[in-house]
Amino acid sequence: TQLLKQSPQFLSIQEGENLTVYCNSSSVFSSLQWYRQEPGEGPVLLVTVVTGGEVKKLKRLTFQFGDARKDSSLHITAAQPGDTGLYLCAGVGQGNLIFGKGTKLSVKP
Amino acid sequence: DADVTQTPRNRITKTGKRIMLECSQTKGHDRMYWYRQDPGLGLRLIYYSFDVKDINKGEISDGYSVSRQAQAKFSLSLESAIPNQTALYFCATSDGDGRPYEQYFGPGTRLTVT
């Protein structure tokens, strides 16, 4: 069974701080995605990474796919209250998406 | 207007009742999915459909059934609701001809079974 473990589960920081959240597995994935979910809404796709070692930037968010395609990280620079939400990673495996349980981020003003 | 809509947004029902959750999409995608989300358990796949004549069980299909009435409509039924089906339910779509694993989610239905 392919599993994705996300850490930390919860993160509470002040506005302006930097943070990194992680998504790890013992399995190889052909690609990996990151979603953000705000309270009362469905997850929204942020990025897809496909190649081992790939780095993608989306404004203050930097996503990295591990060389072995088993792990990924999301780094946020100068976090803002609008970054608050549940961050989910999802790997493509066995024909469907497998989701991690998420990191719940709270950014206080 | 939202690309993926779900009705109802909230529902409270009693044990043993039959309930249907509906999903419609205007994205023109061929693939549709139903997930449930529980605190601490993440998103789990219930059923998925790659086109109107294709229905597949997901990780946790017991106690649920689905119907793909048209390319744009995919409904989820609980034949006899039980309290442990209390959860947040999401419908999602993806484009099988484009990026099939990039999913677009509806706003969710919060279901409470008492």
Image (cartoon, coloured by chain):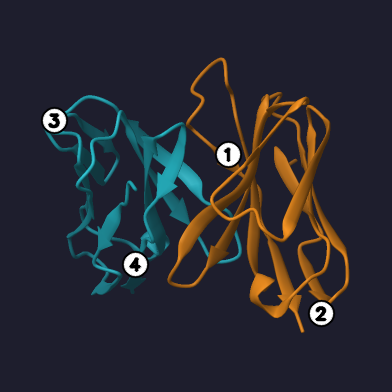
Pointer 3: what residue?
A53
Q: Tell me if mark 4 has few (under 14), some (14-19) or many (20+) residues whose alpha carbon lies within 10 angstroms of its own.
A: many
Alpha-carbon span between mark 4 and mark 2: 35 Å
Query: What hue represents chain A?
Result: cyan
Residue lying farthest top? B97
Pointer 1: what residue?
B104
In the image, taking residue A91 as reference, residue B51 lies left or right, namely: right
Label 1 sits on what residue type?
Answer: Tyr
Label 4 sits on what residue type?
Answer: Leu
Q: Quadrant of residue B25?
A: top right
Q: Position of residue B94 (x, y in %)?
A: 58, 30
Q: Position of residue A67 (x, y in %)?
A: 11, 32
Q: What chain does badge 3 belong to?
A: A
Query: What hue represents chain B?
Result: orange
Foreground mark, 4 or 2, reads: 2
Q: What chain does badge 2 belong to?
A: B
Q: Quadrant of the C terminus of chain B?
A: bottom right
One can see residue B33 in this view: no
Label 2 sits on what residue type?
Answer: Thr
Q: Are marks 3 and 2 in contact (CB under 8 Å)?
A: no
Pointer 2: what residue?
B15
Q: Tell me if mark 1 has few (under 14), some (14-19) or many (20+) residues whose alpha carbon lies within 10 angstroms of its own.
A: many
Q: Are marks 4 and 2 in contact (CB under 8 Å)?
A: no
Alpha-carbon span between mark 1 and mark 3: 26 Å
Q: Are marks 2 and 1 in contact (CB under 8 Å)?
A: no
Q: Position of residue A52 (x, y in %)?
A: 17, 28
In the image, taking residue A48 as reference, residue A5 lies left or right, namely: left
Task: Assign a secondary structure to mark 2.
Answer: loop
Foreground mark, 2 or 1, reads: 2
Task: Assign a secondary structure to mark 1.
Answer: strand
Q: Which mark is residue A105?
A: 4
Foreground mark, 3 or 2, reads: 2
